[in-house]
Image (spheres, rainbow, N blue to C red):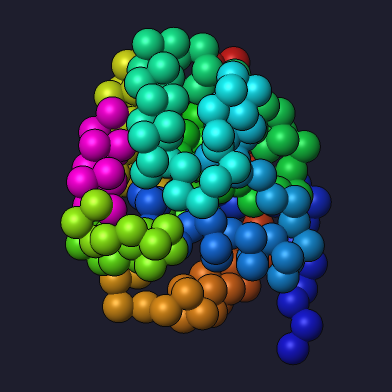
Amino acid sequence: MQARQLQKSTVIGISGLAGSGKSTVAKKLAEKYKLKYYSGGEALKALALEKGYKSTVQGFWESEEGIRFLEERSKDPKLDEKVDKELLKFAVKGNVILDSWTMPWLLKGGFKIWLDASVEKRAERVSHRDGITVEEALRALRMKEAQTRSIYWKLYKFKLGEDFTPFQLVLDTDLLTAEEVFNALSNVIENMVLGTDKTDCRDKKNK
């Protein structure tokens, strides 16, 4: 059955730690419902590339280069603020899926989804994706996520991966395939988002 078109004002935010499956499913949902797709992670990688990092390589975030860029972001919060301001502009225009760690806290309105998974399962997925061992993936994830949590706490005072207050849906993906996650979220969108008007997405700071 052909997917129904969402309202032009629709804004869906999909979040989850690395290996949860958020980027994969966000892209597929954007294609299915004819929504624009924007990724905070990809925007940060583009910024890293401008600054001379080799951010186009597979597994950049878990690499030494990715860790160095993360340390630079820790020292200069304006890098993350720049990306977030751009994503907020896209959100205001609507008709969009935002693949982002920060948008669920910065947006007023929208439908927000958190994909949860254990760090062990996420490390397995990252290991398979990036061609590294599970142990290497686990170490990289723990280091990266500790620093990322610190960045967002300093900037916005939320606890990434611990505070689920903004989300209308939290889905555990540990035992689900990518296709099963896609089907589950399609059902949620069909039943909870179509025909609704939850998309006043102005920056909370401007309220």
In front of the other: 186 or 154: 154
State the image quarter where residue 170 is shown.
Answer: bottom left
Residue drawn where x is 79% and y is 67% of the image: 5
Q: Find out whether residue 138 is within the magenta segment.
A: yes
Question: Does residue 149 lie above or below 156 as drawn?
Answer: below
State the image quarter where residue 146 is shown.
Answer: top left
Q: Is residue 59 visible?
A: yes
Using residue 41 as the reference point, say whether residue 150 is left or right of it. left
Position of the C terminus, as image quadrant, is top right
Question: Does residue 102 lie above or below 15 as drawn?
Answer: above
Question: Does residue 162 lie above or below 1 as drawn?
Answer: above
The majority secondary structure of the magenta stretch comes to helix
In front of the other: 175 or 183: 175
Q: Find out whether residue 194 is within the magenta segment.
A: no
| Residue range (magenta) | 137-147
Using residue 93 as the reference point, say whether residue 85 is left or right of it. left
Position of the N terminus, as image quadrant, is bottom right
Residue 109 in the image: x percent, y percent?
A: 56, 40
Residue drawn where x is 50% and y is 29% of the image: 106
Residue drawn where x is 47% and y is 74% of the image: 178
Residue 2 in the image: x percent, y percent?
A: 78, 83
Q: Is residue 122 visible?
A: no
Residue 40 in the image: x percent, y percent?
A: 56, 38
Residue drawn where x is 61% and y is 29% of the image: 49
